[in-house]
Amino acid sequence: MTAEFAVNIGKAIGTFFGAGAVALARDTRISGPMLTRAVASGLMAAGCEVVDLGIAPTPAAQYYVAKLGSLSGAIVVTASHNPREFNGIKAIDAKGMELRAEEEEAIESIYFESRFRAAEWSDVGSIRTDGTAIDRYLAGILDQVDADAIRRRRFTVVADPGNGAGCLTTPYLLTALGCRVVTLNGQADGAFPGRMPEPVPENLAALQRVTVEGGADFGVAHDGDADRAIFVDEKGGYIYGDRSFALLAIEELRARAGTVVTPVSTSRLLDDVVRTAGGNVIRTKVGAPIVARVMFETGAIFGGEENGGVIFPAHQFCRDGGMAVARMLECLARQEKPLSACIAALPTYSLRKSNVAVPAERREAVLDALVRLVAGRRVETIDGVKIHEDDGSVLVRPSGTEPVFRIYAEATTPERAEALAQEGVALVEKALRRR
Ligand code: MG
């Protein structure tokens, strides 16, 4: 990630947007100031007016674009949940949504073919700062929940933004909702001295401990750009994202029946709870931008992924860590029982994961062979191949980032999940042997 690269990506995105105003935000990474200024130069060279929002969670930048309604889009310089040496440049469209794959490919071809728009001397873009994105975002979230009901409960919450962009939002959101707040890794710091940005169990031991020691109602952790929220219950138990997603889905469906959208890889737990609550589930290919698009097109009431990224369309069409925290508080405010008991009441499935190496050039052929091998069984081919059995399922799909096929098996018992995972592995190996 060099300055030269960022200038040209800025030029490519500016060319794609075709002038107009573009918001620019970043997470807390060390290379953020260097890269955002380079991206801003590229955007101005292509004739765009840059509105610098400074450090802000990705959903805060998306909310700014969605609510202002007058921008061509936004760029967020963030590597999300990835380790501290990474960074990334993400484009957001005029509705505040992540781009479609074909739009990203259009930007890539502008970049690789150097088809940059070069503004005339008199049309070179300008730059100004707007420090209101955070306040607008927090006000938007407060509008979505029953703040008085939450305040009456005087919850204690441990917030672990992991030194990322969520440092600027979640502790203040919790305070505004009358919570007693304990922060952990609460200073914006791109060296990520407290923990690595991904809210996975191995990074959250301190949050689990402090939540118990502080007598908190729950703990919450974000990734580097705070579009994901992972919860820890009052006993220090790590709550996997599919379980908090299911609990929040029940909360959304309590108000009104409707559609919940999630990728084919999410646990069948979601089907169970949504069906019980009178809603229906639409499955999509893996990827939050796809989930958000399908939600937009179908008028869904809720959606998300199993990694803590959930989407509340009444607020906006993107994963939103801050909104997830507010809704979890609202959910608990309505309950007589603690978070651990709410989670324990959900159905439980055993999960097994595995990988099989498949050379990139054989990816499509192996996938075709897999489809033929499972002919006649109950299968879904939305993304890879998912085989359904009465007591479980196994999904086999090529990874988007590595030359492997990933196998996700899920069943009512650990033994059955293991058997289904092994069947998935065997199927890929058999497909690999076919020429
Ligand atoms: Mg993220």
Image: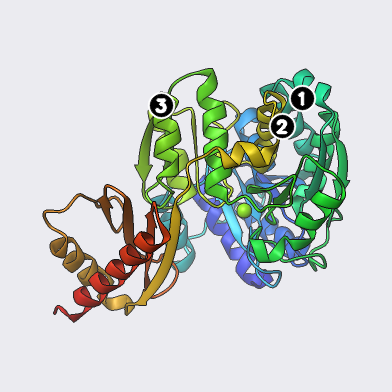
Image quadrant of residue 244? top right
Q: Which amino acid does label 1 sit on?
A: Ile
Which residue is identified by label 2?
Answer: 329
Q: What residue type is labelled 3?
A: Gly
Image point (72%, 51%), residue name? 221
Image point (57%, 56%), residue name? 118
Which residue is identified by label 1?
Answer: 150
Which of marks 2 and 3 precedes in the sequence?
A: 3
**Mark 1: which secondary structure?**
helix
Q: Which amino acid does label 2 sit on?
A: Leu
Report if the beta carbon of the residue with label 3 is closer than 8 angstroms to ligand 1.
no
User: Which is more toward the observer, 193 or 98?
Assistant: 193
Which of marks 3 and 1 precedes in the sequence?
A: 1
Q: In which quarter of the image is the C terminus?
A: bottom left
Contact, mark 2 vs mark 1 (Cβ under 8 Å): yes
**Label 1 – label 3 distance at C-alpha:** 26 Å
**Mark 2: which secondary structure?**
helix
Contact, mark 1 vs mark 3 (Cβ under 8 Å): no
Mark 2: few, some, or many residues within 10 Å (few <14, many ≥20)?
A: many
Which residue is identified by label 3?
Answer: 279
Q: In which quarter of the image is the N terminus?
A: bottom right
Image point (45%, 25%), residue name? 277
Q: In this view, does 27 lie above or below 217?
A: below
